[in-house]
Image: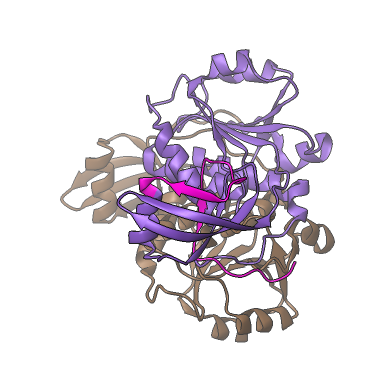
Chain colours: A purple, B brown
Amino acid sequence: MAERERVKARLHVEQSLAVATLGLDAARAHYLRHVLRLERGDRIAVFNGRDGEMAARIDGFGKGWCTLSLEEKRRDVTPEPDLWLVFAPIKRARLDFLAEKATELGVAALWPVFTQRTIVSRVNTERLLATCVEAAEQSERLTVPTIHAPAALEAVLARWPSGRRILMCDETGGGAPLADVLARQGTDGPHAVLTGPEGGFARGELDALRKLPFVTPIGLGPRVLRADTAALAALAAFLALSGDRLRSPPPRAHAS
Amino acid sequence: MAERERVKARLHVEQSLAVATLGLDAARAHYLRHVLRLERGDRIAVFNGRDGEMAARIDGFGKGWCTLSLEEKRRDVTPEPDLWLVFAPIKRARLDFLAEKATELGVAALWPVFTQRTIVSRVNTERLLATCVEAAEQSERLTVPTIHAPAALEAVLARWPSGRRILMCDETGGGAPLADVLARQGTDGPHAVLTGPEGGFARGELDALRKLPFVTPIGLGPRVLRADTAALAALAAFLALSGDRLRSPPPRAHAS
């Protein structure tokens, strides 16, 4: 790929990029002007998860707004691994970290599920999405993970999409090693990694999960991993073994 | 394995376990008495990285001390993967997280190295060790990672131990996919994962690293990963593909 002209920032936007000019909301205008201290004429990149990534030049700032002129396309959308992370929510600092790392690693969706032993009773999905957007901007991703509305594990399993396999992190040691499971059943097709809360799944939940034809319990080695470590380890190992591994990052395109 | 009697805590100690009674220091005595609110007669487990894990009963507390009677052996030391993490230090909150996760995943040693673009100028190795000890206690590990004294990357490479391969996380996309590298060269023998600072390795560092016969640049997929994410992804994928994957955690032995 030819060396691309560097840009000073990379922003996710909601709007279509099939336009000549784009208005940014107050938060993004503030970020460009007062956090990054950019000026009229500076070049940035924008992406929306659908139209790839476009170069854009700052036309002007006002109180709570900023307009951009869209320039050339920098990258087309490329297919990403169809891997979800379904997880019992954990404490906030750890959840922020998990969302950031999962986004960088490349998950397509995050789905908080409440299990019997889940201690956290509410998930701030707006905050979760903001963390994912920031991680996507930083990591040169062209999409932002979808955040599914939090729901009870039982309800989620009852209407589970057909054809999507669940790799369940089984902290009791009952699962086969992840690499062996993937060598056997492959990494093609839609998948999800499922992790329990700090205290693990309840006995009845484990029994029910093991009976479902689309669930495979997996083991992650001899140590007892925290819920967030288990999630990251399973995602990283899955992606290292999937077709995603064959692709390289784009040339560094903005100062972070 | 037979179900073992549960213990109320799991503590790493420095002393030999080939004794009948063991005195704890003030910090550990405080932790058992005032944080966990344990009492005389309560059973815990202790490990020191050399003698496996022993059951121990609390004999008594005093101001700044606690004595334990050692009881039966619960587990023998088992060989662990000989995998080091050599990393340019990062901001403190991220470093704590990285040390915790690396310990849970099973690294044998952590080695902070200063590179040309490393911003952090000092590493609190005592704090780093304390984080690793706590993660080892929580994760049923029988050892605590060794913390090597921070040093310049160049000096570390100049006296690199013979026979230990370095897997260098190459954020420029120049490396082959990790899974392919490991399929080719295997996971046997001593290894280290090397990650650069937030801003990446300098051009001259990359050139020098690539020339070393014991260094293999690796790629971690199409996104640009933060330094800590790259480290965790490489460790998790390596361990998922190594013999370590074949072992299971011990039965849950203490409430965390």
Is A185 contained in the magenta span?
no
Expressed as whole percent of the image width and height from the top left, the position of residue A81 reads: 71, 41
Expressed as whole percent of the image width and height from the top left, the position of residue B70 reads: 40, 45
Comparing B29 with B193, the one in front is: B193
Please, is residue A207 above or below residue A252 in the view? above
A91 relative position to A104: left or right:
left
What is the span of residues highlighted in magenta in the rendered image?
A: A1-27
Residue drawn at the location 61% of the way across and 17% of the way down: A157
Residue projecting furthest to the front: A20
A146 relative position to A92: left or right:
right
- Res. A223 in view: no
- Res. B137 in view: yes
Expressed as whole percent of the image width and height from the top left, the position of residue B75 reads: 55, 44
Please, is residue A222 above or below residue A201 in the view? below
Comparing B144 with B20, the one in front is: B144
Residue drawn at the location 17% of the way across and 48% of the way down: B62
Is A9 contained in the magenta span?
yes
Residue drawn at the location 83% of the way across and 36% of the way down: A184
Main SS category, magenta section:
loop
* Quadrant of the rendering where the N terminus of chain A is positioned: bottom right
Expressed as whole percent of the image width and height from the top left, the position of residue B105 reads: 57, 51
